[in-house]
Amino acid sequence: MEYTIQRASAALGKPTADVDQKLWSGADEIEVTHFTWKDSGHRPRVRARVLWDDDWLAVRFEVDDRYVRAVAEKFNDSVCSDSCVEFFVAPSGDPTQDAYFNFEVNCGGTILLHCMPSTSNREAGHQGQSVSDADGATIRIAQTLPKIVEPELTEPTSWAVEYHVPWSLFGSYFGDVTPTAGTTWRANFYKCGDKTSHPHWGSWSPVDTPRPSFHQPAYFQPIHFA
């Protein structure tokens, strides 16, 4: 299992979350299909695509959902309780160098982002570091739903989020890791809704743990920069 991040055919400008945006037609698509934990039975269709250029890493999720909710308002609020999509990425192809960013974004476009320590550092007692508000503000984001979705939408609802992350943000927390063509990193993609009426937990790369746990870099898969 692996994914190739295509280079954008044009400069990555302001995200729009437009499902028909021509720029995204050149991006490879993956689906979140592994719902391995006991849940409510609600398992939405989730597609993700990623692009890159010299300045940005762009991530897009499209979700055919139901029981949609968003109440988190501020950067680094607990968005996993809402209808949420997540992209965890370690800027290294070496499985032993698995410090990573966990981009968690609810359907209203609110983000949680921490810099998580490598497995060896975590076992030594090191904790994750919250990305600062100022650094979080460098991420450009667009979404198709309002920021707050409450009460919960119980009818079938499709939504999308698109965000562009500057390479300088990775540099602030991991050093100079800006990729070039041929670079390999490791990542996983997720969908959750912990405190919706129908909680669920899905992943692209299957995670073999007794309980839902996305913070499992051992299950990240290679992603290659074309």
Image: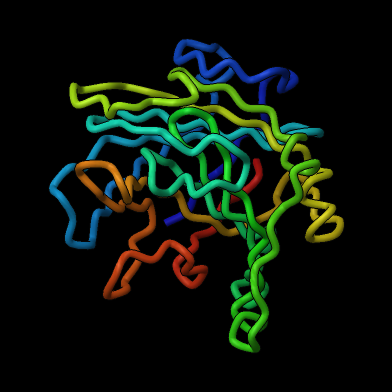
- Between 130 and 139, the residue placed more toward the observer is 130
Q: Is residue 38 left or right of residue 26?
A: left
Q: Is residue 33 left or right of residue 133?
A: left
Q: Please state the horizontal and vertical placement of residue 184, each as a whole percent of the image.
A: 65, 56
Q: Quadrant of the C terminus?
A: top right
Q: Please state the horizontal and vertical placement of residue 146, each as a whole percent of the image.
A: 46, 19
Q: Is residue 31 visible?
A: yes
Residue that extends furthest to the bottom in the rendered view of this protein: 124
Q: Please state the horizontal and vertical placement of residue 23, each as a whole percent of the image.
A: 59, 17
Q: Please state the horizontal and vertical placement of residue 163, each as a whole percent of the image.
A: 61, 31
Residue drawn 44% across and 67% down? Answer: 219
Q: Is residue 18 above or below residue 99?
A: above
Picture quadrant where residue 149 is located: top left
Residue drawn 53% across and 12% down? Answer: 21
- Between 181 and 204, the residue placed more toward the observer is 204
Residue drawn 60% across and 38% down? Answer: 74
Residue drawn 33% across and 61% down? Answer: 206
